[in-house]
Amino acid sequence: MRNLSFDPKDLEELTSNAKQIQDDVLEEILTLNANTEYLQRFLHGCSDKDLFKKNVPVVSYEDVKPFIDRVANGEPSDIISGKPITGFLMSSGTSGGKQKIFPANNKFFEDFTSVYALSSQIISKHIDGVQQGKAVPFFFARAQSTTPSGLHVSSAFSSYLLSDYFKNWSSNRFTSPNEVTMCPENKQSMYCHLLCGLVQREEVVSLAAPFASSLVGAITFLENHWKELCSNIRSGHVSEWITDLSCRDSVANILGGPNSELADLLEEECRKKSWNGIITRLWPKTKFIETIVTGQMSQYIQILEFYSNKLPLYSPRYASSESIFGVNVNPLCKPQDVSYTFLPNFSYFEFISVDEGNNEEIVDLVDVKLGCFYEPLVTNYSGLHRYRMGDILQVSGFHNTAPQFRFVQRKNVVLSVSAEATTEEDVLKALNHATLVLKSSDLILMGFTCYVDISTLPGHYVFYWELKAQTTSDVVNLDNKVLVECCCTMEESFNALYRKVRKREGSIGALEIRVVQQGTFDSLMEFFIFQGASSSQYKTPICIKSSEALAILEKSVLARFFSDKVPL
Ligand code: AMP
């Protein structure tokens, strides 16, 4: 295992020598992998870097899936990687409706540990006293599945939490014992994280969750369970429904005996009508919140600022199942201005230009241009070569010679509340299925659009539908049963991750259809054309982001319907 205590000097060294380090990384990977079946086809056993760029194609998941599946099914991992594969990481991205899995080995965990160590060093350089206190972690290690070859599969973050790397790193940094993080039952784990955090409130200097959606979910959970949590603190007894024994024992230990004084204090804060600043009221020594608030997570900035009284939101890293990319070296910047400095030792990075007219030109890490937009390509230590990430980034600056990127968007994702990523294709498929249900009634779908409503927590998907009756002129008779069925059908058609997050974790609320008056979509079109859209090429946006456009839809809502069961 590499040295866990990352010296900030390394950051300067790494970013000053980005070109040389990237060259060395590529050489190392090619030397390791030249004889893999995957690369043999293009390089014939040679590990020459120029030949790599000339012959090895840029690929997406469909191209590498057959190789990944073969390893998952028991063939030796050296068909793709000279460094043995020790497990798989389940991505939140999907391919053909199924979640993607990526091969991994210890390099991933070493890099993850380095990034954690580095971001902790960075924040403590900017805020005094954070090393002396603890963080309340909203970390959940989900159960792993196993491939036919016997290798474990779980999300990147779960795999890290389950590894010894995390166990070594976490000791004494968090208010929750590892047993709580490892508890396979989500609700028990969440409850115990909160209980441990509240009991040790005097020591708490930060709250941490991998993504902002999980932090918002934790506060919503607290809103629903504070009375019970306070009653446990008052009596010194953990609720009976916490049945996971190791979790229960470790929490009972932290709870100690009855503490009515603390219970009174917490109850007084929770009972107040407004939850404005609840985080700083319950944990008065909190100095910052560590969670990703860029990309799809930016929708939660406002609510987190409300809950935390505008504490600094530190968005620490940009990472994925394919590779770790970089860290945010400017932790106190505004959440809207976050960028990530790429570290050249994680993988070999190339970038496809996605600016119009640039013809998909591919450049190296150190050759990207300020202000330009790119999609990263990853060549990593676990069998991916020139793999298209599907993320769009913009160069926002340089730290020494290493570029810094602003996360712009994940390609094609139109809706996301939590960890799930629903694409345009998913939305269209779901609508196709729902319109089959509509066929049984007198109604035809004339127009639709959608958005994510996070004003209710957990957030949920809202579809605006304009309907027309087939047999009557303009009066639409809305059959509750049919429209509720449409909501359910759409949810059942969404990808596996949506259904999992909605069902198992409850982090997505019931899907809603809002039926709007006839003519609403014409008004919407007029609005967009007034804003500059071309009238001859106008198409209703699949997903609405503008608040003015939403206002047009909202004022025409005739009725609302919600799915009444969680999807299978
Ligand atoms: P997964 O492979 O499931 O871990 O998901 C990785 C994806 O999550 C990336 O490709 C990004 O689309 C997204 N992601 C990861 N880190 C960030 C970040 N800091 N900001 C925005 N999106 C992120």
Image (cartoon, helix red, strand yellow):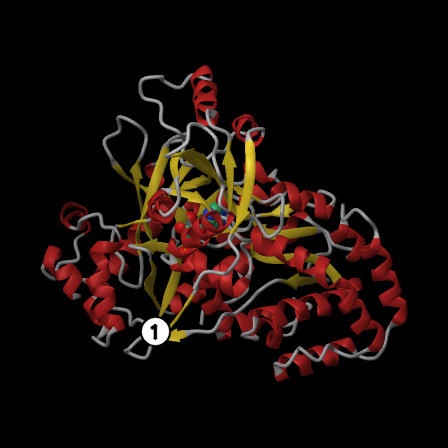
Residue 468, image quadrant: top left
Classify 10 Å Cα crowding around label 1: few (below 14), some (14-19), many (20 and above).
Answer: some
Using the rendered image of the protein, determine whether residue 328 is visible from the camera's viewpoint: no
Q: In the image, is residue 246 above or below residue 454? A: below
Residue at 35% x, 37% y is 374
User: The disc labelled 1 sits on which kind of residue?
Assistant: Thr
Q: State the image coordinates of residue 558 (x, y, percent, origin top left).
A: 55, 35
Left or right of residue 304, residue 493 in this image: left
Left or right of residue 568, residue 85 in this image: left
> Badge 1 is on which residue?
86
Residue at 36% x, 17% y is 534
Q: In the image, is residue 174 above or below residue 397? A: below
Residue 352, image quadrant: top left
Observer-nearest of 320 and 304? 304
Left or right of residue 373, residue 286 in this image: right
Residue at 46% x, 24% y is 519
Q: In the image, is residue 428 above or below residue 372? A: below
Using the rendered image of the protein, determine whether residue 541 is visible from the camera's viewpoint: yes
Residue at 50% x, 51% y is 317
Dividing the image into 4 quarters, which one contains the N terminus? bottom left
Q: State the image coordinates of residue 521 (x, y, percent, origin top left).
A: 44, 27
